[in-house]
Amino acid sequence: MDIKKTVDRLTRKFQSRNPFEIIQGLNTILVFVPLIDTKAFYQYFQRNNIIYIDENLPKSEQAFECAHEMGHMFLHKKANAIFMDTRTSFNTNKYEMEADTFAMNLLISDATIEEYKECNAEQLSRLFGYEKRLIDLRLKSFEE
C-alpha cells in the first residue's frame, strides 16, 4: 500500500489533516485512558477499529500518537503488534517506521515542506516540534 496516496486520499475526503477529525469521520472508537509503558495502541476487535491514547500526554503528542495509530489501522489492520512484541521474536520495527511515515505525511503537508524548503531537518524539527528522525522520514517521502 502506498502510504502517501493513502494519506492524500484521506485528507481530500475529510478536508483535514487533523487526525481527531478524520478518526471521527471514520467512526473509529477513540479512547483516552491512563496508559503505562506505552503512549498509544491500536486494536481491531469484533470488526471495530479502536485507538487508545494516554490521556496524560500533551495535546500535540496525542495528535501524533493518533496519527501514528491511524497508520497501523490502515497499513497493519490485522497485525497484532503487541502480541508480536511480547510473545514472539518478530521484529516490528518495519511496522513502526511505516506508521511513523503515515503520521508525518498526515501531519505535515507537501505544501508545508515546500514552504520551508530552505530549512534543514534539524530546523524543521524545532519548528514543528517533532523528533528529527520523524522529520527525516517526512523529508524522505517528500523526495520520492
Image (cartoon, helix red, strand yellow):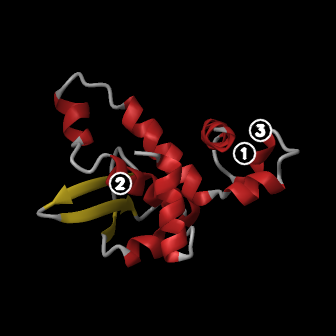
* Front residue (pair 8, 30): 8
What type is the residue that disc 1 sits on?
Answer: Ser
Q: Is residue 102 left or right of residue 80?
A: right
For marks 1 and 2 on the same chain, the one whose residue lies earlier in the sequence: 2
What type is the residue that disc 3 sits on?
Answer: Glu
Q: Which residue is mark 1?
A: 125
Q: Secondary structure at mark 1?
A: helix
Q: Quadrant of residue 59?
A: bottom right
Residue at horizontal 46 percent and vertical 56 percent from the top: 6
Image quarter hosting the C terminus: top right
Image quarter hosting the N terminus: top left
Q: Secondary structure at mark 2?
A: helix
- What is the distance, in whole Å, between disc 1 and disc 2 at their CAs? 26 Å
Q: Quadrant of residue 85?
A: top left
Q: Are marks 1 and 2 in contact (CB under 8 Å)?
A: no
Q: Are marks 3 and 1 in contact (CB under 8 Å)?
A: yes
Percent of width and height locating residue 28: 31, 70
What type is the residue that disc 2 sits on?
Answer: Phe
Taking 37 as reference, is 113 above or below it? below
Q: Secondary structure at mark 3?
A: helix
Q: Quadrant of residue 96?
A: top left
Percent of width and height locating residue 123: 81, 43
Percent of width and height locating residue 127: 77, 53
For marks 3 and 2 on the same chain, the one whose residue lies earlier in the sequence: 2
Q: Which residue is mark 2?
A: 74
Question: For the residue carrying disc 1, how many other residues have a C-alpha within 10 Å: few (<14), some (14-19), or many (20+)?
Answer: some
Give the number of the mark in front: 1 or 2: 2
The numbered disc on residue 122 is 3
The numbered disc on residue 34 is none
- What is the distance, in whole Å, between disc 3 and disc 1 at their CAs? 5 Å
Residue lying farthest right? 118
